[in-house]
Image (tube, helix red, strand yellow):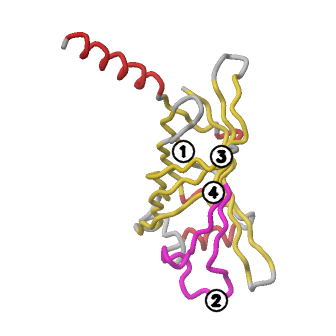
Amino acid sequence: MRKFLIIILAVMAVNARAQSTWKVDKGHSSINFSVSHFLISDVTGNFSDFDIEAISDDKLDNPKVKVSINAASIDTNNDKRDDHLKADDFFGVEKYPNITFNSAVFENLGDGKFSITGDLSIKGITKEAVFDGKIRGIITDRNGRLKAGLKLTTVVKREEFNVGNGMASIGDDVTVEINLEMSQQ
């Protein structure tokens, strides 16, 4: 019985060591979006203040991901529009300062491709979201730390989150693209 317990503890120790925290390198990452305007052009923008963390192994197999975005950091290169997007009829940043995503299911699709499903919360409304992703590579930097590059995309229905409801000049489908560089801690 004692040998059995030692084996179980050893397996648990190996598994515990295999999992580590990966943190976003904000200087080499971005969260961008685009949405149609009057069906003839796209408005693009980004969020400049965000935090992304993953718990996973060295290969980023089956990561548990947490994302927090400061909604007030929205930037569409137009101050007047950005102020309107921060107002209650869009993001309501005073009442709802953060946009969050917490992963639940990771599906490895092969060749570095994956999908990650989880809970997306905007303006106090939580809906399931699915991101299509690609691991663009994992390297060891000159300090011996693992770094990973990922690209994730999804489409968010803005009216499902009460963002700009009734604004006929703006498309409902918002394409979100996350270009991500993460470092293993």
Q: Along the horizontal axis of the image, is 70 left or right of 5? A: right
Quarter of the figure with residue 86:
bottom right
Q: CA distance from mark 2 to mark 3?
A: 40 Å
Give the CA separation, mark 1 to mark 4.
Answer: 19 Å
Work out which quarter of the rendered image holds the N terminus and state it: top left
Res 69 label: none
Q: Quadrant of the C terminus?
A: top right
Amino acid tagged 3: Gly
Alpha-carbon distance for marks 2 and 4?
Answer: 28 Å
Mark toward the start of the polypeptide (1 vs 3): 1
Q: Secondary structure at mark 1?
A: strand
Amino acid residing under circle 4: Asp
Circles 4 and 3: CB distance less than 8 Å? Answer: no
Residue 139: % across, % down: 71, 27
Q: Residues within 10 Å of mark 2 (few under 14, many from 20)?
A: few
Q: CA distance from mark 2 to mark 1?
A: 32 Å
Name the disc covering residue 132, or none. Answer: 4
Q: Of helix, strand and loop, which one carries label 2?
A: loop
Which span is picked out in magenta? Answer: 153-177
Tell me the element at label 3. strand
CB atoms at circles 1 and 4 under 8 Å apart?
A: no
Is residue 157 a member of the stretch shown in magenta?
A: yes
Residue at 47% across, 57% down: 118
Identify the residue under disc 1: 51
User: Could you say which is closer to the camera, residue 155 or residue 84?
Assistant: 155
Q: Residue at x 63, y 57 (%)?
A: 132
**Residue beneath disc 2:** 168
